Amino acid sequence: MSSVFEYAPAPESRSIVDIAPSYGLFIDGEFVDGTGEAMKTVNPATEEVLSEIAVGTDADVDRAVKAARRAFSRVWGPMRPADRGKYLFRIARLLQERAREFAVLESLDNGKPIRESRDVDVPLAAAHFFYHAGWADKLEHAGLGPAPRPLGVAGQVIPWNFPLLMLAWKIAPALATGNTVVLKPAETTPLTALLFAEVCRQADLPPGVVNIVTGAGDTGRAVVEHDDVDKVAFTGSTEVGRSIARAVAGTRKKLTLELGGKAANIVFDDAPIDQAVEGIVQGIFFNQGHVCCAGSRLLVQENVHDEVVAALQRRIGTLRVGDPLDKNTDIGAINSAEQLARIRELSDIGEAEGATRWQPACDLPDRGFWFPPTVFTDVSAAHRIARDEVFGPVLSVLTFRTPDEAVAKANNTTYGLSAGIWSEKGSRILAIADKLRAGVVWANTFNQFDPTSPFGGYKQSGYGREGGRHGLASYLASEDGQ
Amino acid sequence: MTHVLDPDALTAGTPPRREPPTPYADVTRSESAFRAFLHGLPGVDQVGASSRVTMLGTRSIKTTAKAWAIDTAISMVDLTTLEGADTPGKVRSLAAKARRPDPTDPGCPPVAAVCVYGDLAGIAKEALAGTGINVAAVATAFPSGRASLAVKLADVRDAVANGADEIDMVIDRGAFLSGRYLDVFDEIVAVKEACGDAHLKVILETGELVTLDAVRRASWLAMLAGGDFIKTSTGKISPAATLPVCLVMMEAVRDFRAATGRQVGVKPAGGIRTTKDAIKHLVLVNETAGPDWLTPDWFRIGASSLLNDLLLQRQKLRTGHYSGPDHVSVD
Amino acid sequence: MIGNERLAVRKTYKLYLGGAFPRSESGRTYEVTDSKGAFLANAARASRKDARDAVVAARAAFAGWSGATAYNRGQVLYRVAEVMEGRHAQFCEEVAAGEGLSTGKARAAVDAAIDRWVWYAGWTDKLAAVLGSANPVAGPYFDFSLPEPTGVVAVLAPQRSSLLGLVSVLAPVLASGNTAVVVTSKARPLPAVTLGEVLATSDVPGGVVNLLTGDAAELGSWLAEHDDVDAIDLTGAPPGRAMEFEREAAGSIKRVLRPPAEEPDWAGDPGLTRMRAFLETKTVWHPKGF
């Protein structure tokens, strides 16, 4: 970083958030005590304990599902669709009004830079509610049959990488289509979901329509396995996704899964190199690489490999790692000690397998969970860092010579969530986009999201889409009840 | 670098053309070779470039960083008046402002240069004598550039004779846009020769080039031809300096130095009116080409009203309260 | 046998796999009888290795079939209907015998099966328009979503409706650009065998459809657990086995089309559900700039 132009600390004030010493579960419109032993949520940038969080047991989940069922059959289901939409509009507005509060709380609990929570997570979450609010009374025009019906109670389990945004991706379409919700936030990032519960109350959303049950894996399992849940939506690891798919086998529950990824980001020699470098950085270092669609495998055409890697390293040298609440921070804290251990382990394996590790000189804070932006070169397709999802700021660089080889390497994974293509040649982009087995293809851009744009995976990255007209299908009974 | 598609190679004109620096010495050997080179530069994706500058625009520059940025920006200003109604009196008053932008604060740095039309360069030179502040003169039939080469060169020589330390020339956009790249190149070379010891800033007039691809090509063309600075705009065309344009130009000088070892400066001009704008440009310089460019030797801001806003912000930082337009001089 | 009556040539049918008609690698066959128990023919009894080979063939055929133009796929599928029409009488006979239907009802089933095939043939080049979208994102990007085939689909065909049911589950898989490994009705495989002959003599590339006569109870797990099978249709899963197959399918995150509570009346409007079930959605973003 520059020694001439040092950016003075520019911390966003945390005084806007008011974190209670402890939180209960949000069931039937009220905060109630959980019957499990409470857990702590910490700020991953400092390891400071932020609050004590109730852990939902099977009995708590049962209460929540009962509340959701009641709300579905008595209030939310019979309600005029236009009124359901109005509640969602209210929620969207409240998210905007309280945007700064949500952003600060998200960065505190998750470790992500305030620039991202402020400019990406929170505005997109609000946009998801706006978008879906409008659908509530137009579902018969969604191309899903003349009279699409809600499924009933949706059990939703979300990850820690985009706590509020994933909540919005889950709750907004569920409510717009007339379902009620029991949502379990991730164990390490419950706070914005609990603040969202407060927003539900502020919006006068009828009790039981949204229920937030915090906890860890067992709580999630209880939600997924509850007999009276009609729909299960999960975002998280492929491993857990498998166990959920097993758990719902043989039931009536409709299932959508948004799982892991190992996206290829393909750079051709005619790419707009400077924008490609930005896209590579955005692709792998956005949100510390805690992104299922992260562009974690860089496939560079061999004849520009050295140039691209040099430009990339120079650019990475300008990334600012540190205090998530500093407005100039580009890379914040790793979300948990457990995740940090996994990133370290896979990186060490990368080195042991013969790849070359590069990291910029950067000072990391003494406390908290940190990992510097990392690039591995000399990676071969067989290396674990080229195959396993690291879910951290770790990029593997591989090369290719021909478009066919690029496609073959890009598709050579059990995942299929996303991919990137960088080229100035339109016909090549379209041809490659056609051949990539991935649910989202970003050409000359990366990691863009929008509520109107369907998102979801091929292969073992899961099934079902979130966003757009397609996303509604996951929450509606189709023609023959499937 | 060799180019095989070179039908003109054997019929190249007699006066040897000034060679660009290694490793690009041969790229101007023919129109087709030069075209192939310029069109072979990596493309610029406009949306990507825009989102990059938007992100850089979110940098929060506060307290000590802001104080440094404001003083640095003041020291980089080419304080400019380029009106038909300019008079010696106005130029002298501008020169006084250039020397002591804030008369109430001796700690305020002087600007880098005063930029005027060539006929007033002598007045400026006299008024700035002994200050270290340069006189920049626009020349080459500024702002349109529509005159014969002979007239343009006479314009340059006249300005230099009047005492200009820096010449801000305009490129022939008509020739550039119609693909006569060597004509543009040769003209810059000729102007550079006519400059003698004066520094040459080459105005690309990016508002007329329109695309960022064209900005990148024109930047390289001007650097290869020997320009000491590349400058965005005359200030007479809108849009003038924009952040995406400046980004592409900073990338160009960065890459050019990496390839040739020769550093070229950048001057956005026109449209930078607020401290916020100026700081965004400094952030962009810092994170694109790097701190080597963060001095008046390598980065200038062509402006007039900007200076007063910088001074108001500076007063606010110094005194802790807001100031008003009556607390800075009207020029 | 005495007299002038001609002695019938009894048939032993084979599998349809990769465009060829191999015997089961296991050498196993089983007797197929009509609805009253009278011998009709011998059918190959596919083994797990046959299933494995069928998946390999389907995978190999996938790039070509999914990469063909939708118009071309429609033409190829329509050609199948034409060839089926030529075998109309044979299909009627087999359906009548296998399902114990009157001639009229068998004829109606065959008519419906051929018409269904035609219906799906007409879908190939409409799916993208009906299921795709241009997404108005809040930024300078062109963003569109298109349906794409899931890949290799294992189909446990209905056990009762041996032709109309089979066509109703197979044609949507093909129309949407997938390749198929089908386990036919165990007791009533002959229309499927004849359909294989139709497919082989029409323009469907080898490997796009692979027909395994045999027992879904035996083959279901192998297909459900197969990592290179992308989706499975459990319509014809033997009673009580669907949950087990679905659990096994979870291992590779297969798309699973669960069986209906009981085998439906296939004459009803099929809707889009069966095509949707085996389509992915791909969303592509590209900036819009000068």
Image (spheres, coloured by chain):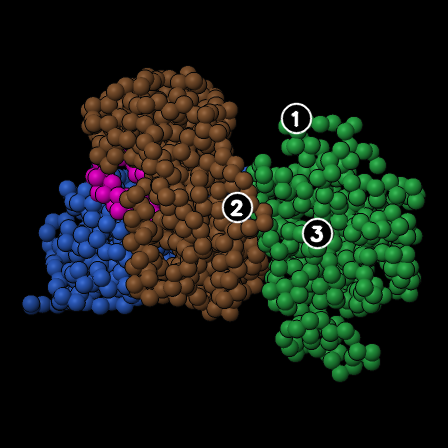
Query: At 13% across and 67% down in the image, what residue appears?
Result: C27
Tell me the quarter of the image containing the C terminus of chain B.
Answer: top right
Residue B63: x and y in percent read 58, 36
Q: Which hue is chain C drawn in?
A: blue
Query: Quick one: C164 or B239, which is closer to the camera?
Result: B239
Query: At 74% across and 61% down in the image, what residue appears?
Result: B228
Residue A194: x and y in percent read 36, 26
Query: Quick one: B40 or A70, which is closer to the camera?
Result: B40
Residue C201: x and y in percent read 34, 65
- Categorize mark 2 by other alpha carbons within 10 Å: few (<14), some (14-19), many (20+): many
The alpha-carbon separation of the residues under discs 2 and 1 comes to 48 Å
Name the kind of residue labelled 1 in the image: His
Whichever of labels 1 and 3 marks the residue nearer the N terminus, that label is 3
Callout 1: helix, strand or loop? loop
The brown chain is A
Q: Which residues are magenta?
A: A234-260
